[in-house]
Structure formats: structure tokens, C-alpha cells
Amino acid sequence: MKLIAFAKSLWERPSEKPNADVPFLQLPAKVIHLIAKSLTPADIALLSQTCRSMRESLNKYPNAAALSRADYFAYLAGMARGLPNQWLCDYCMALHPIDKRDKPTTKWRPCSCPNYSVLASHRRCRLQNPNIPFEHHHIQLALKYTRLGQRKYDSYLRALLEPYQEWHFYTMGRRAIDHEAHYFAFPRIVTGGDGNPRYLLFSTCRYLGGGRDMLIQNLGCQDICPHLHFRDDGDYYQYNNNLFRAFQYALEPKYHGHEWEAACPRCATDFSVTRRGRNLYLKVWQDFGPEGSPIDLAWRSQTFRPGLDGIENGPTEGPTLYHEPGSIKKLYGPVPEIPTTQKAVIDTTT
Amino acid sequence: MADNSMVTLMAADHIEIQATLQAVKQCATLGTMLEVLDEQQTLGLPIPVLEVSGEALKKVIEWCEYHREDMVVETEQPGVAAQILTSLPQWDTEFFANIGDKDLLIKICNASNFLEIPLLLQYSIFVIAQALRGKSTEEMRAFLNIENDLTPEEEQKIREDNAWAMPQN
């Protein structure tokens, strides 16, 4: 009997082999393949790297080297999630190390992308007109550090989410702003309906009337997203969009004090225009999505630069991301106080 | 035996679980077993389910009790579990949300495969896949409780094998 008990104890002794008792690795091959069928090729490539057993189970699936460009971006985005000191570059289709001096509020900033200087002038702008000069990697890193919640990244996270201010707001093109204008932008990480953190931006432009009448042709150019703008380039769409109409209505004396709210039909942008007293206020709420890759629709729909298909994003072509008008404004929550005099801006509402 | 009569199931860890016959018939494996067994000789005896732990079996039966009036999906029906879902019905969403323990979720998936409950298998696969989607390898390991047993050399080889060839600018 003692011998049987001893033999049994040997049999029941916990295995020293790692993962021997892991329930997932005890699933039959058929079930593993059914799970793989519900995953993207990028997910499968990442899952196959978890351990030896998964590598063997999933060896019939293509590895990341055989993925399409779009899937490879998703694969790299998955890799970047697990590497706090790396970010995914859309130009190089590669991961780069972080540089903590690289933050959205610094105009002439260093960047670890080896191709950055070549592209600097083009890459700095999400839109053609001046705006908070952040890029997708700032969003990636802010969302990643928020998810990780590690103290060692706190100061860089604060820098990535620092409010931006422009006390001499100007626009490109032939038409200058004939009024003093101020621009402020407040990035914020908010938990979305699916429980994942999302990068939202509230930006506002304040046009000071001074002692003069405020006319739309004196307000220069304005871009709030790749689809809504008014410019001086004779583009038909500048006169036929929600933004232009909201400015027109807000400037009519009978509508003073009324907040004209609208949304972009092509990307996750809500906005409002209000004339109050002698001043005009443009407020914009935008959703840049959850942690992901720079080719995700949430970012692609918000930048005018061409996507993998080579198509530029503009009023007449490019990607479309629908949203419920007003939902981004609601998700952002209370807006920060906008300073009236030049001082450091702090978002006290978060 | 009437469909509302009670049956006792005995899990691998000898935990006994009561279930209605109708719920048990959701499991094709047990349904077939009941059909071939002599009712007189087996009446009152617990049915052994030796591949499934009591904890997982309890949850599987909870699911089967709720779905006991559903039409039993034929296991021969091609690819029921292979169909890709986009969402779950509300009750099932709550059922999986209340599980909490990730290992238990995987055990339920395994049990539903063993007991041949195509719909539960399909739903549990959906929940596991949802949890893995968009995650890094490290996050997948953490979710699945997998220890990294790859050597640095193997990891280096994987990195090289998975690198996309592209001209460097």
C-alpha cells in the first residue's frame, strides 16, 4: 500500500515544467484554432510569441513578416503596447525609442525618428493651419502611460498632456486675421464606453472684436479637421460646410449669445461657435481614439496626410469615421477655464 | 424520464451538481450517454463528468439551465462554433462578465468543447478572443497565465523571423 501511495504522490507531484497546468494550453488544438479564427493576423502573430507551446500550436499561421502592411502596423502597435520606451512610427513602419524632450507643446523639439528632419515641416502639422502640433506618437505614449499607471512615467505623461496656448494665433494663406485671436488646446485621457482610455482634445479659438465690426472675411482661415475649414483658396467646400455656416450664423446680430453646435460628418469632431459681447468663440472637441496604430481610422480621419492607399484626407475624399454628434463633447466633460491674460494654463477639471 | 426531472452530475473533483434533464440535454455528450444507458439501472446514480472540475461544471450547468428551452444545436451542424460573432445576447454578456476568473473562463470553454455544447463553446471563444484582441504579447501572457519559457536566443530568432523586410530610408 505504501508503495502505491508513494507512486501516486510521484504522479501527482506538481510538474516543474512551466505552463504544465495552464488551462489555456490544455485546450484541444481544435479550440485553439477556433480562437485564432476570431483574432486578427497581428493578434495571432503576437499570441504565437507567448511561449513554446503556442509557437508550435500556431505555426501554420503566417508570422508577422508575411503580413500585409496594414496588419504589420497592427502587429507593431501590439508590440509597442508591451514596450513602454518605444513608439510606433508611421513613416518608418518601425519602433523608435522615446525621447522625453519630445512633447507636443514644444515647437522645435527633438525626435528619435531618423527620418524626422527630412519630414519636419510636413510632419509637424496634422492640419494645414496652425494647431496644437502633436503627432500620433504623443497620443500612443500618453495612452500607454495612462494604462500602465507607473509612477516613473508620470512626469512625461504630464508633459504629453500639457495644455497648449497660442496668444498670437495666425493662419496660413493670403487672408490674415484682422482681429487679435488666441488659441488654446487641452488634451485629456477619458475612459470610453468600452472601458478603454481614449485621447480627447478640447481646443478653442477666441477672436477679440475690439472696436471693430466682426466679419467672416476678417477671420482669416480656419481648419478644425481635414474636412471642415474655410480658406481663401477658392475651394467650393469652404462655403458649404457646417463650420462656415456656424460662423455665419453666430456673426448675425440677431443670434448673438446663441451657441451654434454642429459636428463633422467625416471624423470624430464636435464644435460650437458663439458670439458673446464683442468676441467670437470657437470650441472644438475631438476624439483621437484608443491606444493603437497611426493607420487606425481614429487618427487617419483626423489628419490630412495620405494613408497607405495614397489618398489624402480632405473634404471630398479620404476616410470617414462616423460619430454621434455631441457625443465627444459629452465624453470630454467639463471644459477647462480659458485664461484671459497670459499665464501658465492648468486644466483643473481633470 | 420527464424533461423536468433532476439529474445529478459528478465532476472530476467529486463535487455533485443537480441539473434538470432538459438542461443536461443541452450537452450532446451527456444527452447521448443518457439515451444509451439503461434508465432502471442508472436511476438516482450520479453521472460522472470526469473531465470537468466542479467549479467549471457548476457554471456550465448554470448556462444550460438558462438555455434549457433553446433548440439544441446539432454538433454535426457544420461550423457552429467557428462562426465569428460580433456580440453576445445580454444575459450571456452578464454571465461571462460575472465569471471574473480568467482560468475559469478557459475551463468553461474546454468543458463546453468536451460536453459538446456548440453555442457555449462559440460564446466562450468569442469572450476569450475579445480579451486577447489588440493586446501585446506580455498582456496576453498575463491574461492567459502563461509563463514565458522562450530563451533569449529563441526570442531573438522570433524577432528576426517576424521582421518585415523593407528598404531603410
Image (cartoon, grey):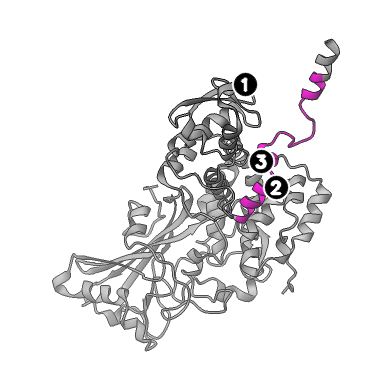
Dot 1 crowding, Cα within 10 Å, few <14, some 14–19, many 20+: some
In this image, A274 relative to B68: left or right?
Answer: left
Disc 1 secondary structure class:
loop
- Residue A285 pos. (x, y %): 37, 61
- Please say if A94 is above or below B139: below
Q: Which residue is mark 2?
A: A29
Q: Decide: few, some or many residues near mark 2? Use Cα within 10 Å; few <14, some 14-19, many ≥20.
A: few
Q: Which residues are magenta?
A: A8-37
Task: Name the image quarter holding the N terminus of chain A.
Answer: top right
Please, which chain is the residue tagged with disc 1 on? B
Q: Which residue is mark 3?
A: A24
The subunit carrying tag 2 is A
Residue furthest to the right in view is: A3
Choose between A207 and A134: the one closer to the eye.
A134
**Label 1 to label 2, Cα distance in Å?**
27 Å
In what element is the residue under mark 3? helix
Identity of the residue drawn at 51% across and 47% down: B73
Q: Residue at x 53, y 64 (%)?
A: A296
Contact (CB < 8 A) between labels 1 and 2? no
Compared with A341, A217 (above or below) is below
Q: Amino acid at mark 3?
A: Phe
Closest to the observer, A209 or A70? A70
Is residue B127 part of the magenta span, yes or no?
no
On whether disc 2 and disc 3 are found on a single subunit, the reply is yes
Percent of width and height locating residue A169: 39, 71
Do the CB atoms of the residues marked 2 and 3 lie less than 8 Å apart?
no
Q: Quadrant of residue A176?
A: bottom left
Give the residue number, with chain letter if any, for mark 1: B14
CA–CA distance in space, label 2 to label 3: 11 Å
Secondary structure beneath disc 2?
Answer: helix
